[in-house]
Image (tube, rainbow, N blue to C red):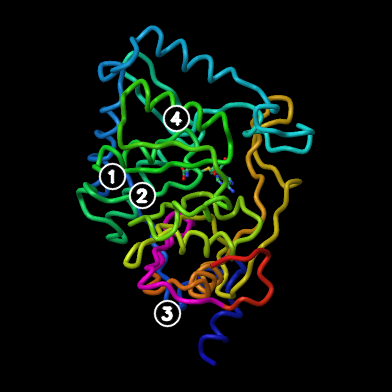
Amino acid sequence: MKYTKVKNHLPNWLKRLFNIAISRRITIEDVSIESLPSYLYYSNLMLNYQVKDLVNTDAKAFKQRILEFLVLTDYKMEDFDDPAMQRDLSIKFHWGHNHDFGDFSLNGRLGNRHIKILTAFKDKLKAFPKSLEGKKFLDIGCWTGGTSLILCALGAEVLAIDEVNKYIESLKYLKYAFDIKKLTPKKLSLYECTLPEFQNSFDFVLFAGVLYHVTDLIIALRILFNCLKDGGKILLETATVLSNNAILVYKGPTETTRGSKKDLNRGGWNWFVPSPVALEKMMEDVGFVDIKTRILRGRCFTIGLRKNHVDMMRSGLSTTIR
Ligand SMILES: C[S@@+](CC[C@H](N)C(=O)[O-])C[C@H]1O[C@@H](n2cnc3c(N)ncnc32)[C@H](O)[C@@H]1O
């Protein structure tokens, strides 16, 4: 009663924050991820991938090949019929994460997100150990591969997938150029991770910045649950809706953000954005336990454990799935 009275006098934006803050399961934190201890450590790991570290090519040929990617605009290589209906960033190549190659640097559309995401999961959620030696990671929606490169430098064996061919081609080139034996880039949709080699196989699944791009969230989460070994963890990062109710906000391909059609650089291209409570409920419903969320800079960082493989409610699923 007391809470309702107070809440009624608040402006809407503060009501929304208040709703989140009173939730027992969710904490909002205004944190500078760049000042957390792992940030500098992971930033330095990116320095393992500079022209001084090239193995299978030289600095000149390397730069030339990277520049070719940067001017690549090709919808046919993605098997699209009508480019007008497709996401700009799938038609035209855009570099994903910042990378200082030594002789030259690339500013990615996502800035230092690769470093920030892994720092937040490590320092705020204690999601994985300092060394990933002997651990298998599945990196979903890797773009040009910033997170995969850091995970490999930490010792992990990484299978990096993306539905966009041109980004996987660029990551395959980095693997070749730097001879990164523990990295396997593959052009695949996460919906194809039902293949036998994916089942019960990974210690960790990194699912960052992708949930809102996919159409069937329940099937996506169940596929990733099945990819984990018993005892494996999902590290999920997503845009969120600051509501205390379990809701999914529909966006659709007409809602684009910054950029222009002419420059093929618009953002957006999202389907559904979940509230933190909806996200946790969906994760529970596909089998995850020990789910923990932090909201950092307005986005959800959520981890969940596959303790053991359990059945899920089968009614209404869009496909047959284990
Ligand atoms: C916003 S970016 C996130 C990049 C990176 N994971 C990060 O967090 O910085 C989303 C990426 O997911 C990819 N993607 C979208 N839907 C996918 C799907 N169904 N399967 C695999 N990758 C997908 C996109 O092509 C894009 O590279």
The residue carrying mark 2 has its beta carbon less than 8 Å from ligand 1 = no
Q: Which residue is mark 2?
A: 137
Q: Residue at x 63, y 34 (%)?
A: 90
Sequence order check: which comes first, mark 3 or mark 2? 3
Kind of residue at disc 4: Leu
Q: Which range is magenta? A: 292-312
The reply to whether residue 119 is visible in this rendering is yes
- Residue in front for this viewpoint, 245 or 176: 176
- Residue in front for this viewpoint, 77 or 27: 77
Of all residues shown, which one is farthest toward the front?
Answer: 196
Residue 300 forms part of the magenta stretch: yes
Ligand 1, what quadrant? top right
Q: Which residue is mark 4?
A: 171
Looking at the rendered structure, which numbered label has been put on residue 24? 3
For marks 3 and 4, give the one nearer the viewer.
4
Mark 1, secondary structure of its residue: loop
For marks 3 and 2, give the one nearer the viewer.
2
Q: Mark 2 and mark 1 in contact (Cβ < 8 Å)?
A: yes
